[in-house]
């Protein structure tokens, strides 16, 4: 546990920093710059930037975090404080596909439990886990705004409503299943 | 409701195939805003005040009054902001999604009117991240509006200039609270801010800011088009205008309808075809997860702010959640409280630590491990998180279904304790 | 003033404050967490709930949180009714749902605000039955220990670190009941104010690591009021001892100076006191001896003339005695001509202009920093300037009827209401990043701009011949004309006397602008804790360094030296010592000289002494513990020598008498020592559990309480306890029910934010009504033809030599650096992190690249324990591979050595705890 503390040298103790140009792609940089122009301060684009990079890379690695912080002229710690505040920013790797199953009240009243059990059993994962083939991550989500068509889930950002066992099976099939040995 | 002008929100609305700019314009779109441009911002404010429009975000505060706190005139700050609150994350609520997917130009026009009225030069739509389709459609509509000169510099040849941007959030209920929303837009942790100073004076980036709900803003075009008097006449009760009502739960036909303000709840149930076969209604939340339970005997109440408040609940968002007799009220309350505990921002003690505590107790009671002491603690927690004790309205909102549930469904709670388990699971 | 009713009792309180402040000022016990007197209110914890009533007839009232409620005339509130009492108990109950019960092993135990508040609210029964949230801790470096499970999420740490002190690497993370306070990843906290987290955190999340490694309960510590030794601000501290070792330094509230906060150099630098490097015995020519040694006596009685060198690291008493012993004409205050020049100029200006206190600086509405890196030379001043930068936002808030203690509101307004800050200079100071006007220049240019500015402000100010006026200077002149309380800051760290002269002229000019309401402020930062004390003595005349050297080479003279641990001093002393007949050195730390008589000095924690801070304010420290080994205070050695040689100084029998004698020369000091403690002062808390039984394993005799010999006061378990008498400095803070430092409010009439009261204490260098202009003719001829001038830089952890002997500071010491622009680096084909040396000097510097380097200059930083004499250089020589490897190996080795030292020290302390030296019994020495 106790690490040897290095002698304080040039930057050795500062937060880890990277040059964002070395990490982010030009299209990411352009998209983030575009967002920055919409606000009075660069850090205001933090959530947009995190989402832009997450769209490209599925999750926010430490390296991406440092790069975005560098680009937005803020500290990595401050950006971490924002990234970890939101439900939809992934600070851990996720699968090829991410299923967010709504667990709020209208879905709960409409067989959420059955759907949830079916998903967990079929994929053989708990909420918060990824199938071992790295294909599907299963996460819960608060009310998706599909209450009139409950139960519902969000697959890679797309809302899918009126779920039942059959439609789930079809959906999973179309994703190429999700093997979890 | 045959006259389309009686349904100012839904006439333009088509979820399958929303109107593009020219279709919207050819059916009377942007007329309200054109009217607004012909009069002074103060006059626009006056019209909205006269219309008696109340905010549809849940608190029901007069929109005109809210605007009146914004500094106007020569000495007003250089920049002001308008923000559309489209963070809709209240469980059981999906009206803003419907409006944005179905009538994006209606929202843009509403925002133009509001922004003009308060002299804002930049506006944001703060959209919840999960609403991808809304984002796509709004993006398209905003581009169209810019191209047609409804947005940008010198709109339609007037000196008025407005830039409108779409901000998509990343999933956090508290971002719907207007001061937390402002922090979120500034790229800070979205915890609420203390008031005063009110956002109308010191808001986004320290400048005067109005945050209005999406539905509130969608009401503005018709008010400016047909006049405030016309708007006050739409109602079936005392609050003016029309309202998007809706219902979810085990009803035959869950959905949304634009109805005159003050429509009785029973009518909404009827539009939904009543409860599904074999189920009876045990209770209902009138306007989202953060409102107190009402009982079947309350169904004839008009759905408007004061009437619902008198019955001990809140109209909230006006979207009903129905509890049927096959579902356990304790389980339902647990589910609601889990949501609020999960979504607490973590700023103030009662909410941050009180809600998980309530969840812990409810979980125990629900699974048959609770006792009488737990009921007392739960009751105390309701007081602990009540209005005035927390920093913002999230925790008191969370307490509403809990305290009313404990009152109306006391027997159910007792059964869980006495029979050491949930009767609905047997 | 406002009349308010609390539980139907009427009180009169100051308007504008919040209800919590008012109640605490009335000495009521109202619990709170998130509020902090220096940081304002945010209303997060909800602990300070009260009930407010509309009028006499309202008997239900509504719950409010006191810290967010301004007091208003006629307001009726209650604190003792069941509703609010129950709620306050519930708040603790909720906080305790995840607080561990690890008080027995928590370094905060016994002085924990959370413990106090838990007892105060009466929360004694646990209702929560669920699991607790747990967190992983982070490694935050050698100063601060992290234990997140104890967090009660009051947000104070983040608000102090980020908002108040401008740190960037600590923030709240995650949300709901998982909020986490820490860094993005493990690593040493970067802010030089991180140590305050220990006192800001109301529980044991952030604790003092060196203290915690060998902790003691507060009630077992013996503490004394002290003064920080690590820069010229002279922050007030409490030094705490147990079993013969100094355990920690904490903040001692002083409304005008440090208020609630210290810098880390001050908090953790005391470790030199416990260091293995301490000189504990008398050495004659390299051999340990004692005072009765005949050779020693012969040496001291030598009839040849004695010359003396004073020290700005030693007390006024010590320096005074040396000056008396050798005679003022043989006394030399400083060795370096540049330092002499700076000192004499500084003293002249100080005679004309009083220096602003930190509290005054916090009121500034325009600030000019002239070539001084206060961030590194006097960090606490930089912290105060940071607070001043919010003044316009506070004013704006008040205009919007939002009280200025509404911290979040003020911060929201700050970006559009900046306080102008002009920064002339070089280097990467965090203050320069906040500047609205920033001029990158060397000290000479900075001074010249200063002279021009003075001339723009007042036609009477001599105008420099030089260049055209920069529009920025015009703009600044305008800002200063409009400002009510502008502040000018300069100092010694760039090593250029012209800066002081320029600041003087600006100050004069500002006074002329507003002859009636001159509230302008000046602050000149000297380098050491007692630089100005030495300056005061030097006004009697004496030897310059050069004269001293001449005397030594041309005549047979002896040299007596109060030690100064900076490397340049040592270097010069080695040379001078060689030509002295006899050399006597009084020192706290071993230096390895052979041909001298070394007399071991007790440290500030072991003896009384006084020093003059940057304002010329005299402050005295009191020992917390007995001197180690043969150590004695410098003045006492010198008096003893006086006795040997028959000098009048030998007649002094005690410290009080000595001080009376000093007062004969400096009558202004009378008031200071009069107000100093003379009675009994309790250095131990009333709870001293086990103190009396401390030596029971060695002797059955109960020890007498330790008392400094010859001191004018007594130290005891009895006597004045914290806060009993307003005038007495607090040894520690404690009050019934308040074991943590939050008890501070019990000793004050009112909390901060009120109108500034007059600063207590004696300013020794009095202001003289006739104001003089300095007519400085800048010499622009290029004296030195070298390619680059080397501009000196400082570091918080590195430029103070004493603290480098404190282990945790030594671990954080910044190694030598040379800073250049990217263009320079490119043309020299150098990269950041490479090692270079300058001309033929062997010292290796790490290359750092920065945009803050003026033309034809390089910035150079050498730690205080490394000697580097060059001021110019022509060539940078890249280190060879072997050199680089050797350098790396040496650093790696050092890390290992330091870890080993730490372990060894720990073992030594533990042994010492078991068998505390018997000499701690009074009279058993
Ligand atoms: C916890 C919390 C969540 C909220 N969420 C939303 C929301 O998602 N959408 C919304 O319009 N208002 C929401 N509100 C209400 C807003 O704070 C604010 O009152 C509203 O946006 C004002 O708009 P209106 O005046 O047009 O109603 C929320 C309030 C709280 C306390
Ligand atoms: S009640 Fe408190 S913790 Fe909960 S969301 Fe509001 S501010 Fe945050
Ligand atoms: S001290 Fe008042 S709410 Fe925290």
Image (cartoon, coloured by chain):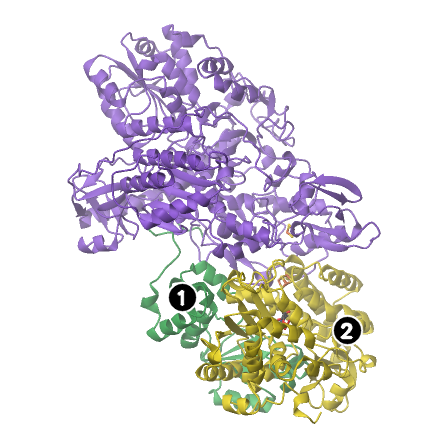
Q: Height in image: C269 above or below A17?
A: above
Residue bearing the label numbered 2: B306
> In the rendered view of the protein, which quadrant contains the N terminus of chain C?
top right
Q: Residue at x 41, y 46 (%)?
A: C478
The chain whose colour is green is A
Question: Which subunit holds the residue at mark 1?
Answer: A
Q: Position of residue C838 (x, y in %)?
A: 19, 42
Determine the secondary structure under disc 1: helix
Q: Residue furthest top?
A: C646
Ligand 1 within 8 Å of the CB at mark 2: no
Q: Which chain is purple?
A: C
As drawn, C96 above or below C579: below
Residue C269 placed where, x, y %? 43, 36
Residue B139 left/right relative to C399: left
The quarter holding residue C543 reads top left
| Cα separation between marks 1 and 2 | 48 Å
Quarter holding residue B426: bottom right
Q: Which chain is yellow?
A: B
Residue C865: percent from left, percent from top: 31, 35
Question: In the rendered image of this protein, does residue C319 appear above or below residue C872?
Answer: above
* Tag count: 2
Q: Is residue B344 above or below residue C748?
A: below
Secondary structure under the numbered disc 2 in the rendered image? helix
Residue holding disc 1: A68
Nearer the observer, C397 or C512 = C512
């Amino acid at each position: 546990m106790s690490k040897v503390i290095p002698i304080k040298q040039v930057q050795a103790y500062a937060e880890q920093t990277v040059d964002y140009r070395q990490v982010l792609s030009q299209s990411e940089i352009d998209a983030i710059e575009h967002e920055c122009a919409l606000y009075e301060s660069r850090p205001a684009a933090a959530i947009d930037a995190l989402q832009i990079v997450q769209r490209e890379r599925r999750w926010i690695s430490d390296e991406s975090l440092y790069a975005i912080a560098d680009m937005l002229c803020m500290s990595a710690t401050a950006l971490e404080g924002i990234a970890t505040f939101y439900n939809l920013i992934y600070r851990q790797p996720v699968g090829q596909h991410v299923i967010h199953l709504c667990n709020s009240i209208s879905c709960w009243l409409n067989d959420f439990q059955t759907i949830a059990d079916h998903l967990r059993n079929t994929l053989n994962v708990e909420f918060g886990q990824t199938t071992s083939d790295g294909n599907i991550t299963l996460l819960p989500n608060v009310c998706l705004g599909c209450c009139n068509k409950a139960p519902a889930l969000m697959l890679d950002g797309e809302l899918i409503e009126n779920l039942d066992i059959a439609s789930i099976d079809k959906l999973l099939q179309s994703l190429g299943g999700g093997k979890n040995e | 409701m045959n006259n389309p002008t009686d349904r100012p929100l839904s006439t333009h609305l088509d979820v399958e195939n929303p109107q593009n700019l020219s279709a919207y314009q050819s059916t009377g779109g942007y007329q309200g805003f054109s009217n607004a441009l012909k009069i002074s911002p103060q006059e626009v404010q006056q019209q909205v005040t006269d219309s008696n429009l109340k905010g549809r975000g849940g608190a029901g505060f007069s929109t005109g009054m809210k605007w009146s706190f914004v500094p106007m005139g020569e000495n007003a700050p250089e920049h002001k902001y308008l923000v559309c609150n489209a963070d809709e994350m209240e469980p059981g609520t999906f009206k803003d999604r419907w409006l944005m997917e179905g009538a994006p130009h209606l929202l843009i026009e509403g925002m133009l009117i509001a922004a003009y009225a308060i002299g804002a030069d930049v506006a944001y739509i703060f959209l919840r991240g999960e609403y991808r389709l809304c984002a796509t459609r709004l993006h398209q509509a905003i581009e169209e509006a810019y191209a047609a000169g409804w947005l940008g510099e010198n709109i339609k040849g007037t000196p008025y200039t407005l830039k409108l941007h779409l901000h998509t959030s990343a999933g956090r209920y508290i971002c719907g609270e207007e001061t937390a929303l402002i922090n979120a837009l500034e790229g800070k942790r979205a915890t609420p801010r203390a008031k005063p100073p009110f956002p109308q004076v010191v808001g986004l980036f320290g400048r005067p800011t109005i945050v209005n709900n999406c539905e509130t803003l969608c009401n503005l075009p018709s008010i400016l088009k047909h006049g405030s008097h016309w708007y006050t006449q739409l109602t079936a009760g005392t609050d003016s205008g029309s309202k998007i009502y809706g219902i979810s739960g085990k009803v035959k036909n869950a959905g949304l309808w634009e109805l005159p303000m003050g429509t009785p709840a029973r009518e909404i149930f009827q539009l939904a075809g009543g409860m599904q076969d074999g189920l009876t209604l045990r209770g209902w939340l009138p306007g989202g997860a953060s409102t107190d339970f009402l009982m079947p005997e309350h169904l004839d109440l008009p759905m408007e702010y004061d009437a619902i408040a008198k019955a001990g609940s809140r109209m909230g968002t006006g979207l009903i959640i129905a509890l049927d007799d096959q579902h356990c009220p304790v389980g339902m309350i647990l589910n609601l409280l889990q949501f609020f505990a999960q979504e607490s921002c973590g700023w103030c003690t009662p909410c941050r630590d009180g809600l998980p505590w309530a969840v812990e107790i409810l979980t125990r009671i629900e699974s048959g491990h609770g006792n009488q002491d737990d009921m007392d603690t739960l009751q105390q927690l309701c007081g602990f998180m009540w209005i005035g004790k927390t920093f913002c309205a999230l925790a008191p909102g969370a307490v509403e279904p809990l305290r009313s549930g404990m009152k109306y469904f006391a027997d159910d709670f007792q059964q869980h304790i006495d029979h050491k388990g949930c009767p609905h699971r047997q | 003033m406002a009349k308010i009713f609390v539980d139907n009792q009427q009180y009169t309180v100051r308007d504008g404050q919040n209800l919590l402040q008012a109640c605490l000022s009335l000495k009521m016990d109202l619990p709170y967490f998130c509020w902090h007197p220096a940081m304002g209110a945010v209303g997060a914890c909800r602990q300070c709930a009260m009930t407010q009533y509309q009028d006499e007839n309202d008997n239900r009232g509504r719950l409010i949180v006191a810290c967010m409620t301004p007091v208003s005339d006629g307001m009726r509130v209650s604190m003792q009714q069941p509703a609010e009492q129950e709620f306050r108990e519930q708040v603790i109950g909720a906080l305790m749902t995840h607080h561990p019960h690890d008080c027995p092993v928590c370094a905060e135990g016994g002085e924990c605000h959370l413990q106090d508040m838990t007892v105060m609210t009466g929360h004694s029964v646990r209702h929560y039955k669920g699991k607790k949230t747990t967190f992983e801790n982070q490694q935050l470096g050698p100063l601060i220990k992290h234990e997140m499970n104890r967090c009660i999420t009051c947000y104070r740490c983040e608000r102090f670190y980020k908002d108040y002190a401008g740190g960037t690497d600590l923030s709240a993370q995650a949300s709901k009941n998982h909020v986490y306070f820490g860094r993005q990843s493990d690593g040493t906290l970067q802010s030089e104010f991180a140590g305050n987290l220990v006192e800001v955190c109301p529980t044991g999340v952030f604790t003092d690591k060196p203290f915690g490694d060998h902790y003691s309960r507060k009630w077992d510590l013996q503490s004394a009021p002290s003064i920080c030794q690590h820069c010229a601000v002279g922050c007030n501290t409490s030094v705490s001892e147990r079993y013969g070792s100094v355990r920690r330094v904490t903040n001692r509230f002083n409304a005008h100076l440090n208020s609630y906060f210290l810098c880390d150099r001050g908090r953790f630098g005391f470790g030199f006191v416990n260091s293995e490097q301490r000189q504990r015995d008398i050495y004659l020519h390299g051999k340990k001896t004692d005072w009765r040694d005949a050779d020693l006596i012969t040496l001291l009685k030598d009839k040849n003339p004695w010359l003396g060198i004073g020290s700005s690291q030693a007390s006024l008493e010590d320096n005074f005695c040396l000056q008396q012993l050798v005679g003022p004409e043989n006394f030399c205050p400083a060795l370096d001509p540049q330092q002499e020049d700076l000192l004499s100029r500084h003293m002249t200006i100080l005679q004309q202009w009083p220096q602003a206190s930190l509290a005054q600086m916090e009121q500034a509405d325009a600030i000019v920093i002239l070539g001084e890196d206060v961030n590194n030379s006097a960090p606490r001043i930089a912290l105060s300037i940071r607070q001043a930068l919010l003044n316009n936002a506070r004013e704006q808030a008040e205009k919007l009827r939002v009280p200025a203690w509404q911290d979040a509101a003020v911060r929201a307004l700050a970006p559009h209401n900046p306080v102008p800050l002009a920064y002339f200079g070089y280097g990467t100071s965090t203050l320069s990043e906040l500047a609205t006007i920033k001029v990158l220049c060397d000290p000479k240019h900075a001074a010249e701009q200063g002279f021009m500015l003075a001339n723009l402000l007042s036609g009477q100010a001599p105008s420099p011949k030089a260049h055209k006026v920069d529009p920025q200077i015009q703009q600044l002149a305008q800002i200063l004309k409009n400002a009510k309380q502008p502040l000018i800051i300069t100092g010694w760290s760039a090593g250029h006397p012209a800066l002081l002269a320029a600041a003087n002229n600006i100050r004069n000019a500002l006074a002329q602008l507003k002859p009636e309401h001159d509230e302008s402020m000046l602050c000149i930062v000297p380098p050491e804790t007692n630089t100005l004390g030495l300056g005061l003595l030097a006004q009697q005349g004496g030897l310059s360094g050069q004269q001293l050297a001449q005397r030594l080479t041309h005549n047979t003279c002896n040299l007596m030296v109060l030690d100064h641990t900076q490397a340049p001093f040592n270097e010069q002393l080695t040379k001078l010592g060689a030509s002295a007949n006899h050399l006597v050195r009084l020192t706290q730390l071993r230096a390895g000289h052979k041909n001298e008589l070394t007399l071991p000095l007790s440290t500030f924690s072991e003896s009384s002494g006084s020093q003059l801070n940057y304002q010329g304010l005299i402050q005295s420290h009191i020992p917390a513990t007995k001197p180690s080994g043969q150590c004695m205070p410098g003045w006492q050695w010198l008096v003893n020598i006086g006795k040997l040689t028959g000098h009048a100084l030998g007649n002094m029998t005690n410290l009080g008498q000595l001080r009376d004698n000093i007062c004969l020369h400096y009558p202004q000091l009378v008031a200071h020592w009069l107000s100093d403690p003379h009675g009994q002062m309790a250095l131990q808390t009333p709870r001293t559990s086990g103190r009396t039984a401390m030596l029971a394993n060695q002797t059955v005799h109960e020890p007498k309480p330790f008392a400094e010999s010859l001191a004018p006061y007594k130290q005891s378990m009895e006597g004045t306890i914290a806060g009993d008498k307003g005038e007495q400095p607090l040894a520690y803070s404690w009050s019934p029910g308040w074991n943590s430092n939050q008890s501070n409010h019990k000793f004050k009439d009112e909390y901060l934010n009120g109108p500034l009261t007059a600063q207590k204490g004696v300013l020794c260098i009095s202001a003289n009504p006739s104001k003089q202009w300095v007519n400085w003719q800048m010499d622009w001829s290029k004296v030195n033809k070298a390619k680059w001038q080397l501009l000196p830089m400082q570091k918080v952890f590195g430029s103070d030599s004493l603290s480098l002997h404190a282990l945790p500071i030594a671990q954080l010491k910044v190694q030598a650096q040379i800073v250049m622009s990217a263009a320079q680096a490119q043309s020299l084909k150098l990269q950041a992190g490479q090692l270079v040396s300058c001309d033929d000097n062997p010292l290796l510097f790490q290359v750092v690249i920065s945009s803050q380097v003026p033309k034809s200059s390089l910035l150079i930083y050498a730690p205080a324990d490394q000697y580097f004499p060059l001021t110019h250089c022509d060539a940078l020589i890249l280190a060879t591979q072997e050199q680089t490897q050797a350098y790396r190996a040496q650093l790696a080795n050092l890390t290992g050595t330091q870890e080993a030292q730490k372990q060894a020290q720990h073992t030594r302390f533990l042994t010492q705890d078991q068998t505390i030296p018997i000499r701690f019994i009074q009279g058993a020495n």
